[in-house]
Amino acid sequence: MAFGYDLNEPVVHYSLFDKERKLVSYNKIQIAGKRFLHDFAATENYIIIPDLPMEADPENCIKDGRFLYQLKKNLPARYGFLKRFSKDQNETQWFELPSHYCFHYGNAWEEKNSLGEELIILWGCRADEMDVEMRQEHPFLAKHWNTKTTRFEFNLTTGKAK
């Protein structure tokens, strides 16, 4: 499996290879903007596309001497789920959650709830506020990062997330 993204267009490139390293499927998945996609997750049957609102802002980067990426707290966080062997990006099921960013994900899996609905559980290191200027010696320990290990639950049957 391989992921990649391009700052010139808001898409994620997803490729799946078999044991002999032959390409099995390829998708070019549209995302909401020129996002900083640092980590991805997958389950046995799905890839998870974190389309989070950490966006490239080259104009203000140059004008204000800021870091290229800034967390846009006014935009929602989106997560897309696509079956691993799908060849159609339009089969991606999207969910929206309040604005946040996750640098890393710890684990993800599929399960069924008591109603038989299909769920994907995802654990990530979530931050709702971020100073990405990295001007402190240990920015991950600073209170303005305020990261929390978070359990996300996506119900593929109902289309609801929490």
Image (cartoon, rainbow, N blue to C red):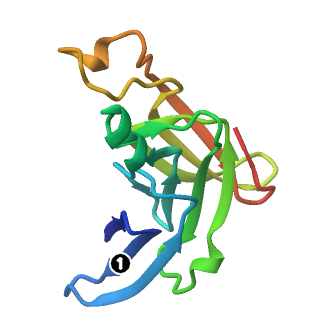
Q: Position of residue 43 (x, y in %)?
A: 46, 59
| Image position of 109 with respect to 63: above or below | below
Q: Residues within 10 Å of mark 1 (few under 14, many from 20)?
A: some
Query: Height in image: 131 above or below 74?
Result: above
User: What residue appears at the point 30 percent right and 33 percent down from the top-left corner?
Assistant: 65
Q: Nearer the viewer, residue 52 or 159?
A: 52
Where does the image place residue 9, in percent across and percent down from the top left?
Answer: 44, 70
Task: Using the rendered image of the protein, determine whether residue 104 is visible from the camera's viewpoint.
Answer: no
Split into 4 quadrants, where in the image is the N terminus? bottom left
Q: Is residue 20 left or right of residue 141?
A: left
User: Of residues 88 and 139, which is closer to you in this image?
Assistant: 139
Q: Is residue 129 visible?
A: yes
Q: Is residue 30 left or right of residue 98?
A: left
Quarter of the image for residue 69 reads: top left
User: What residue does disc 1 label?
Assistant: 15
Q: Where 24 sits versus 111, above or below?
A: below
Q: Residue at x 38, y 49 (%)?
A: 58
Three-letter residue code for mark 1: Ser
The quadrant in which the C terminus is found is top right
Q: Is residue 94 left or right of residue 134?
A: right
Question: Disc 1 on helix, strand or loop?
Answer: strand
How many dots with numbers? 1
| Residue occupying the point 30% across, 20% down | 140
Q: Position of residue 104 (x, y in %)?
A: 36, 40
Q: Residue furthest top?
A: 143
